[in-house]
Amino acid sequence: MDYRDSSLPAAERAKSLLALMTVEEKIGQLIQPFGWKTYHKDNGTISLDEDFKKQVANGGVGSLYGVLRADPWTEVTLENGLSPEEGAHAVNEIQRYAIEYSRLGIPILFGEECSHGHMAIGATVFPVPILLGSTWNIDLYREMCRAVAAETRAQGGSATYSPVLDVVRDPRWGRTEECFGEDPYMIGEFAVAAVQGLQGERLDSDTSVIATLKHFVAYGSSEGGRNAGPVHMGLRELHENDLLPFRKGVEAGALSVMTAYNEIDGVPCTSSEYLLQQLLRNEWGFDGFVITDCGAINMLAYGHDIAEDGEEAAAISLKAGVDMEMSGEMFGKHLLSALENKTVTEDELDTAVKRVLEIKFLLGLFERPYVDPRQAAEIIGSHEHVELARQVAREGIVLLKNDGGALPLDKEKGKIAVIGPNANHIYNQLGDYTSPQARQQVVTLLDGIVNKLGGGDDRILYAPGCRIKGDSREGFERALDCAAQADVVVLALGGSSARDFGEGTIDLRTGASVVTEHSWSDMECGEGIDRTGLHLLGVQLELAQEIHKLGKPVIIVYINGRQIVEPWIDEHAHAIIEAWYPGQEGGNAIADILFGDYNPSGRLTVSVPKDVGQLPVYYNAKRSRGKRYLETDVKPRYPFGFGLSYTSFDYDGLTVSPELIPADGEATVTVNVTNTGAVAGTEVVQLYVSDKVSSVTRPVKELKGFRKVTLEPGETRKVAFTLAKEHLQLFDQQLRPVVEEGEFRIMVGRNSEDFITASLIVKNEV
C-alpha cells in the first residue's frame, strides 16, 4: 500500500505513511511554529530562513501558523509584507522546500487567522463577529465564509482559526467583539454555517479550508471578564450552554477544534481528558484533530501549575487528546524526552500524528500542494467580496433609538457636522485581528457620508473633537464650531481595538493626520484588553454633552467592540446607531442607513445593561436570579434581540399545532407578521421557549428559532417554525438529555421582552 496512491481512503494512506516515519518525523507533524519567521523579503525577493531549513532537515514541520499574518505583533507591515500574489509565491516556496528537502515529502498545513477575513495584506476586511451575529442572517454569513475561504486558500492557507463559539457572559472581556453573542442556540446556528461555508462541499477544493471551532470551552465565562481567567461552572450549565455550539459544529463536520486557555472547576481545558477524549471523540464522534491556542501547553506548567515542567506539560496534553501545538515549543522541545522517559507512549504519539496526516490527505495537499499566484491576485479583495462586506455590515448595524423620526436624514438639504474620534479613523472601525490597510481600502464614516452626498459638497463639516482615551479637549473648539454651523450632528463615539500600526495620530485642532515620534494608542478592546467598566473613555461623553447644549439634533454612531453603557446618551441623543466594528465598508454601510437607502434590520445578540453593576445581565438567566438591586432592577437597557426599523411590524395569529405531542414528537409554530408602516422593511422574527415546571432549574426563556423576513408596506406573511426534541430537552440530574412531560410556554416576537404567547403540552401517552 502506497500513501501516494490518491485512490485510497485518507485513513489508509495515513496509516501507510505513519509506518514509514521516524519518531522525529512524527513529532514534527505535531508542531506549528510561527510562519512569518520562515521567510525574508529583500528588494522584492523571497528567501527562506536558515532555521526553518534546519527544522525541515531534522524531522520536518507539520504546520505553520500565520505565514501571511500581518500586524504589529509579527512586525509585518505594508512596506515589508507580501501582496496577495507575493504571498502565494512565498507559501509555494516554503511548501516546495518542505516537500523536496524532507525524506518523505510530507506537505505543510498552513494555518491562518480568518475571524472576519483573512488576516493578510490586501484581504477583504469583513465586520467583526459581534456584528455578524447581529445580522441574524445565517445564509449571508455562510456566503461570507465562502469568500473568506476562497481568499485564504488562494494564497495557500488550508486551515483557519475560526469560528469563535464562545458564549459571552461578561462584556468587560476584551474578546467580546470576536463572538456572535450571548445565546448558545444562535451561536450554534452560526457554527453550522461557518463549517459549511469554510469547508465547502469538498475539502480538496481551491476554495475550501478547515474550520477550527474555538475556544473549547467556556472561554467567554471567565471570572470577572478577565481573559483566560478561571471558569466556575457545573457540568449541567456547561452542557446546556457553552458546549452546545461546539456540538453543533462537530455535527456539521468541523475537522479541527482549539482548546481554550481557561480552567473549568480546576481542570485546564488543554489537559482535560473528559473534554477532549470522552466528550469530543467518544460521545460526539469528532474525527478531526485538536490544536492548542498559542502557549496553552506552556501555561500548564507556568500559569495553571499542574505540571512540574515543560516535559510533563507536553505529556499531559498529548495524553489528554491534544494533537498539535500552536507555537510548537513544548511538543518540539519535550516530546522526544517524554517518549524516552515513558511518560507518553509511541502509540499515543501515533494516534495524534495519524489524525493530522488524514486531514492533509483530505485537503488534497499531497496531490496539489501549490497555488496559482495569479488566481490569488484576482480573488483576494475582489469587487464582489467588497460589496459583500458592505451588505454584511448593513444587515448587522442596529438602530437603538430614533426619537421623532430623527432618521433617516435628508440627502438633499441641510448641513451635516460629522464629529468624533471614530468619524475618520480607519483602524478604529476594523477590530482586532486585522492586517495593515492601505488608506484607500477602508471607507470611514466621513468617507461614506461624502460618498453619499458628493465629494465636493460644502454641506459636510468635520472635526475629530477628541480621542477615544485621554483628557485632551483641544479639539472641542473646532468641533463645537462645526456643530454650530450644522443642521444636524452625526457624532461617532465608541472604542477601538486598533493596535499600533504606526499610522501616527490626529491633530484635534485641524482633523489632519500627523506623524510624530510619540505613538498614541486608543486601544480599549481586543484580546488582553479587559475593562472594569463599559462607559465611554476619555472625554467623549463630555464632548457629546457640550454639543447637545447647542440644541441641534444629535445622531450618535457607536463604533466599538463591546456594549456601551451611557445613560445620559440613552436619554438625550435623538438617535443612536450601534455599528460595532463594521469593517472596511463600514462607512458606506452606516451612510446607507443614515440616509434611508437601507432600512436597518440588525438586532442585538447581547443584552446592554443599564449599569455595569448589573452584570451578568444575559437574557436567558434562571428564574431565581432575583428582581432588583437597591438602585435599580435587573432588566437591561436594551434587551437581547432588540433593534428598531424605519417601519413597524405587528404580530398576531400565533398557533401551535398540534398543541399536545409526545416527548419525541414535533409541533409547528406559525405566526402572522405584518408591516404596518409606510416603507419596506426587514423583521427578525424570534421564537423563545420556556419550560414551566422541570426537575432541574431552567432559564426563564431560551431562543429556539429565528427568521429574517422582508415585507412591503401592508404585507402580511405567515412565518413557521418546527419545534422538536432538541428544542425542548434539558439535562436531568444524571446529565442525560431528556424531554420531560408538562407545559411549555411558546413566545414569538420582535425581541426577548416583546412577544405574544401560546402553549405546548408534552405528554407521552397522547
Image: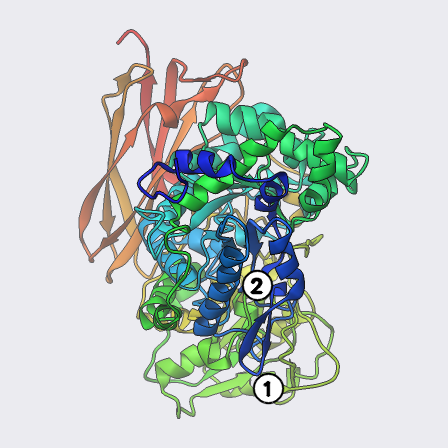
Q: Position of residue 513 (x, y in %)?
A: 61, 86
* Distance from Cα at disc 2 to Cα at disc 1: 24 Å
Q: Nearer the viewer, residue 110 or 79?
A: 110
Which type of secondary structure does the marked residue at label 1 adopt? loop
Q: Quadrant of the N terminus?
A: top left
Residue 760 appears anywhere in the view = yes
Residue at x-position 35% and y-position 56%: 207
Looking at the image, tell me whether mark 2 or mark 1 is earlier in sequence order: 1
Q: Residues within 10 Å of mark 1 (few under 14, many from 20)?
A: many
Q: How is the image coloured?
A: rainbow
Query: Which amino acid, by three-letter code, is at mark 2?
Result: Ile
Residue 753 appears anywhere in the view = no
Query: Which amino acid, by three-letter code, is at mark 1?
Result: Gly
Q: Position of residue 302 (x, y in %)?
A: 79, 42
Q: Position of residue 251 (x, y in %)?
A: 39, 33
Residue at x-position 37% and y-position 18%: 743
Residue at x-position 70% and y-position 84%: 474
Q: Residue under circle 2? A: 569
Q: Nearer the viewer, residue 9 or 103?
A: 103
Q: Quadrant of the C terminus?
A: top left
Q: Is residue 60 above or below residue 94?
A: above
Q: Nearer the viewer, residue 527 or 105?
A: 105
Q: Residue under circle 1? A: 511
Q: Is residue 240 above or below residue 573?
A: above
Judge depth for marks 2 and 1 and give the one in front.
Answer: 1
